[in-house]
Image (cartoon, grey):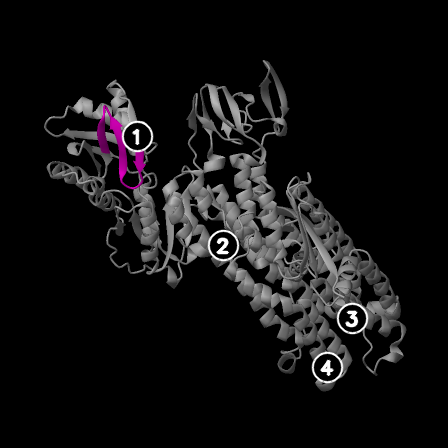
Amino acid sequence: MTALSTLTFQIDDLTCASCVGRAESALAEIPAVSLARVNLASQTATVQFEGAPDTTGILEVLAHIGKPARQHHVVLNIDGMSCASCVGRVEAALQAVPGVIEANVNLPAERATVVTLLPDAAPLIKVVATAGYSAYSAEQPADPAQSKSVETTQLAQMTVVAAALTLPVFILEMGGHLVPAFHTLIHQTIGMQASWGIQFILTTLVLIWPGRQFFLKGYPALIHGTPDMNSLVALGASAAYGFSVISLFAPRLLPQGAQAVYFEAAAVIVTLILLGRFLEARAKGRTGAAIRKLVGLRPKTALVERNGHKEDIPVDQISVGDLIHTRPGEKIAVDGTVMSGQSWVNESMISGEPLAVEKTEGAQVTGGTVNGTGALVFQATAIGNETVLARIIAMVEQAQGAKLPIQDLVNKITAWFVPVVLGLAAMTTVVWLIFGPAPALSHALVAAVAVLIIACPCAMGLATPTSIMVGTGRAAELGILFRKGDALQGLQDVNVVALDKTGTLTEGQPELTDLVTTDGFDEANVLAIAAAIEAKSEHPIAQAILRAAERRNLPMEDITDFTALPGYGIRARVRDQTVLIGADRLMHQSGVNIDTLQTVGAKVAHSGKTPLYMAIDGKPAAAFAVADPVKPSAKAAISALHELELKIAMITGDNTATAQAVARELGIDHVVAEVLPEGKVNAIRDLQKTGKLAFIGDGINDAPALASADVGIAIGSGTDVAIEAADVVLMSGDLGGVSNAFTLSHATMRNIRQNLFWAFGYNILLIPIAAGLLYPATGLLLSPALAAGAMALSSVFVVTNALRLRRVSQTAPVALPQHGKQAKLQATPAL
């Protein structure tokens, strides 16, 4: 009989009994569902399955009816992982929990991110414990840096103990090989049997005290059929120790001439691997420096005014709407709007920009930034996880925990790596016993133990995630947020960069420069009518016309029937007259003949200004010229991208002549102008035929283009909608960050390839040597102690190499691979 399983979860958007009926019907249609009950009051569903719950089926059917299952993001800190095999085992355990949608484990961060239908982390913690590791919710008030410091201290202490016990063993056994007279001295004083006895006692202490962790974790994993790095160490040390014990206490069990002790190998293996893990833990502790630096920006308390009384209270007790007094030199507590005061605020830790920003009444302030010499009173608008700083931290953590496509290959290899090593060690033993010279058993033991110890899945598991952690952390310090970790890999394949114009290449703060009227229309009257209509619009060009009218103190007319025509302009009625304001295409579409004004329009467009036309009751009334200054950093940014051998395109809804003028000024290679918002997506698809494309934009109308590009890059000073649609966010709004993002992408991917080359190359080269490949030609066997040292070194090398990314500067040169060369762009007609 098939066992029944039950899954209870929450559903969003349940508003009535009809919703409940639809949800129950949809859930009941999932194969193997025997019962489905939905509770409107608690917004929950309880589904009974014949067999294991079908989480994918639940998500699909509820999404189809528009009542999505609520997904929870649970973050767990996990202790006890040491290599890629541990990562695979923990991920498999978490993914097997009913209701889990996705589980990703980050080895350097020792953290698991789980997307699940279950709001409670208890089942996840329990299953991790069953797999042999300890876990606790990252939402608990635990300091990761302190936890890592404690782990590093404990490893240091155990390493010192192991070294102190191992040193006499090493001297007693290896001293005679280094100084022959020492060997004679041992024989003449305590005797070789007593020397071996001392080594036995000291080595036993090493294995049962500092080395016990390898056995407590390694053998259970081996018994469960999921051997890991601890299993290799435990087997290697046990083999050397067990053979030595037999040689010491029961030599008759061994073939003639095979008696020898390898206590020093067992002790040195444990000591060196402990040393390697200590160095690795200390280095890994620095990979999360960027997150700790961001978290450190949060002030602990703030001076809050409530009911006329001021009091210093913890920041986590601040509520939206509270008035907060910030004194000179203090950190801004949370996000808010300045109500009074004037000061300059250092926002470099958020934006990467070194210059302080003036804050006066009405200005927005960001939690974590540092107030200057003035005093500010501001009203809290966002607290807790809703603040900009909290969102930045969440973005960085999400990117640091991401898995790049390149990691899939590593995961497939590490899944069978340890079993293969065990097989190679067994094969090595057999070959030496059959073909090896006397004493064959001793030679077989040394070679097999060396093979077990030299293999290093740790380095393979650390190769990618450590580079991602350090690379994305360094990017955050430069004001670049990788919202999606795979954008790190995606950027290196990009060879075409497309940009929006307004607000991206230009300041987004245009000004009215020219106004030409036709016969019969008064300039002041036309401007007053235009300003009254544009006052209803948030478009930058509309604001330019409004500001021009306000400077001349023109009266605002009453308007009716206001209609925005996206991509074209505006229609409204003023004094019973129908007024159109917009691009020439609006006039042509509406049948307005603007031949008398198009000469003016063409002239201003050629000089880089944007022409607009106005018609009243179907008659051409005026032409406006609006200039949006190019950002000071734009030209240098375009040059930097050209130096990276990228092709640059501009996609804009602006007039073709204006767009061409801006392109000439900045050195842009390709222009697509006069496109509507949906036309940008089509233009991107055309450009994608020439290669991978990154799009840079800032406005709401850029969101579809950002989502359609291979990599979307949002200017951080733009809208939230654009930022949410992007893969990469430039917090400063400075285009110079684009080349920095490409630089970091290439540097990080190059670092990952270096790490993988070292990790795989190390094993491919040294495993055969450990097995005795060089013995026939040189008579040399790799000592297990040297194998342990080399193994520890490989992991330390990988982490240390990743830490080099912390030194990547904003102008670091990048050696691009061949696919980064310029793509040949075909001419794309204006849409």
- Alpha-carbon distance for marks 1 and 2? 47 Å
Q: Which residue occupies the foreground of this view, 568 or 351?
A: 568
- Alpha-carbon distance for marks 3 and 1? 89 Å
Q: Which residue is mark 4?
A: 430
Q: Which residue occupies the foreground of this view, 269 or 618?
A: 618
Please name the residue shown 69% across and 75% down the image.
Answer: 423
| Residue 546 seen in the current view | no
Please identify, in this view, whether the residue under mark 2 or under mark 3 is nearer the observer. 2
Does residue 578 show up magenta in the picture? yes
Determine crowd level at label 4: few under 14, some 14-19, many 20+ residues with C-alpha closer than 10 A.
some
- Mark 1, secondary structure of its residue: strand
| Residue 400 seen in the current view | yes
Q: Are marks 3 and 4 in contact (CB under 8 Å)?
A: no
Q: Is residue 173 left or right of residue 397?
A: right
Q: Which residue occupies the foreground of this view, 32 or 184?
A: 32
Please identify, in this view, whether the residue under mark 4 or under mark 1 is nearer the observer. 1
* Amino acid type at image mark 2: Asp
Q: How many marks?
A: 4
Q: Magenta span covers which residues?
A: 561-580
* Amino acid type at image mark 3: Ala
Residue 758 x, y percent position in the rendering: 55, 64
Please identify, in this view, whether the residue under mark 4 or under mark 2 is nearer the observer. 2
Q: Which residue is mark 2?
A: 486
- Alpha-carbon distance for marks 4 and 1? 91 Å
Q: Earlier in the sequence, mark 2 or mark 3?
A: 3
* Amino acid type at image mark 1: Asp
